[in-house]
Amino acid sequence: MYRWWIAYKYICSRFITVAALLAVTLSVTVLIIVVAVMEGFRSEMQDRIRGTTSDIVVESKMFLGLENPEEIRKSLERVDGVESTAAFVQTFALYTSPSGRGTEDMLITAVDLDNETSSKELDAMLEAVPKEPRFDSRLPAGFEPYRARARKLFQAQPRTSRKLFSEKWLKKDLWEAQGVAPEHMRERFHWRTLLPPVVIGAESGLLPGSVIRLTSFTADGARPAEQEFLVAGYFKTGLYELDAKGIFMRLREANQYLELTDAGGNMKVSGIRVSVDPEHAGPQALPALKRKLEAQLEKAEVLFVKTETWREARATLLNAVKAEKIIVSIILGVVILFAGFMIFIILTVQVVEKGRDIGVLQSIGATSTGVANLFFFAGTSICLSGLALGTLFGISFGMGINTFQRWIHLLTGLEVFPQDVYYLDHIPVKFRIEDLAFIIITTVVVSLLASLIPARRAAKKLPTEGLRYS
């Protein structure tokens, strides 16, 4: 018991020990928060990527080079574990603004909405569109009529592909949401309802009801394809690349626009999306099913195609986020090493300063192990106390980080987490037992090493060395 009392007196004897305690607390707190936020970003990004693609994609290596998609679909659906398949077309096009003054590249994705797999994927993107549009705070007050119209359109837009592409929305409800009078509808806007409809990303800056001109190439690549389309509504994936430059249309409109079907009645598409049942969607089962599909394609003599799981398709992005998390953790882990080094210096100095006390304790019967435990307890007490406080503060702050950032914005007007930069309406935080265990174990190991060396040095001191000049 005396060891704990003496260790407590040693800890409280200098302010630098309090500084070491604060260093451990702050380093553990910051490391827990940063790792949790990085894991939250990784998990959020993975979920959003997962929501924009199927489990497995079979895609032609050539431009619109997959022929006879219906036969290939039926062949793939015979593989055990495949739930459904759907053909798709994906190509780039140039978008020309209504004024004709500028062009931008857009990514066109055409899907068969009569297919359950395709309709479910698009429905999820339509459901993700917020009820309130996000406006740039720097827009002047003169844009208020535009804001009001956009807000009404966001609220009125159907959240299913069946309703969005229905005649009721395209010929009536869309224009009522914009406040178009019936007489103006017949005179100025009726021709727009005759155009093929498309759905654009929520970050494109265009309003539903607008007309866009798209220029691409026909399926044979022999000549350009140019046509006007009606913007029917928005979709949202959470990935800025798609939300700003993505366009969805029905496969039958793409067939007419890109001339996918040749004179012999054979259709060409970009590839086939494959949805699997839950039993085969795991990280180990999905690659195994992918190999079965590749064998089935080889058996059907389907050439010049690549088969990828959704993780493989976005492996570069996911691995980059994972590597960033590891690098940041290593950099912040150096702070814990610094705190451990502070404990080592403090205990080493105390061993030198408390030489007389060590000699007195040894002369009245204290063993070398008892003296070593005294300094070992002092060091581990600092580190474990800092670890406990840091873990408590880190988890508490992480769970309430969005509340804190909202209060900072209300009090100072400072946008800590701007949505127009990160395209998230909250700071994603996810605590993993593995991350917390790694931080705790690392801190404990550092504290043990930082305390053990000075403790062994104190145990080796002879009583006569401490009492010689006393």
Image (cartoon, rainbow, N blue to C red):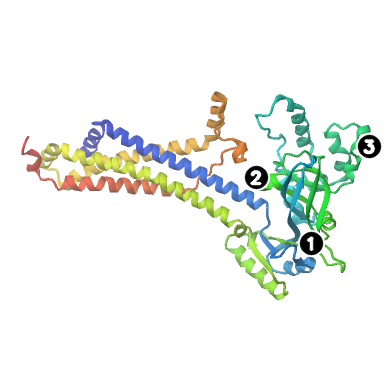
Image x and y of residue 130, in percent: 70, 38
Instruction: Categorize mark 1 by other alpha carbons within 10 Å: few (<14), some (14-19), many (20+).
Output: many
Image location of residue 290, percent across then percent down: 64, 66
Report the disc number at residue 240: 2
* Disc nearer the start of the sequence (3/2): 3
User: Helix or strand or loop: what does disc 2 sit on?
Assistant: helix
Q: Secondary structure at mark 1?
A: loop
**Quarter of image, res 163:** top right
- Residue 186 shows which numbered tag? 3
Looking at the rendered structure, the kind of residue marked 1 is Ala
Distance from the alpha carbon under mark 3 to that under mark 2: 37 Å
Q: Position of residue 274 (x, y in %)?
A: 70, 61
One can see residue 167 in this view: yes
Residue located 94% across and 37% down the image: 186
The residue nearer to you, when weighing 30 against 203, is: 203
Tell me residue 142's x, y (percent): 74, 25
- Count the marks: 3
Nearest the eye: 226 or 363:
226
Q: Is residue 450 left or right of residue 315?
A: left
In the displayed orientation, state which residue is furthest to the left: 468
Q: Residues within 10 Å of mark 2 (few under 14, many from 20)?
A: some
Q: Which residue is disc 1 drawn over?
A: 219
Q: Amino acid at mark 2?
A: Tyr
Visible in this render: residue 124?
Answer: no
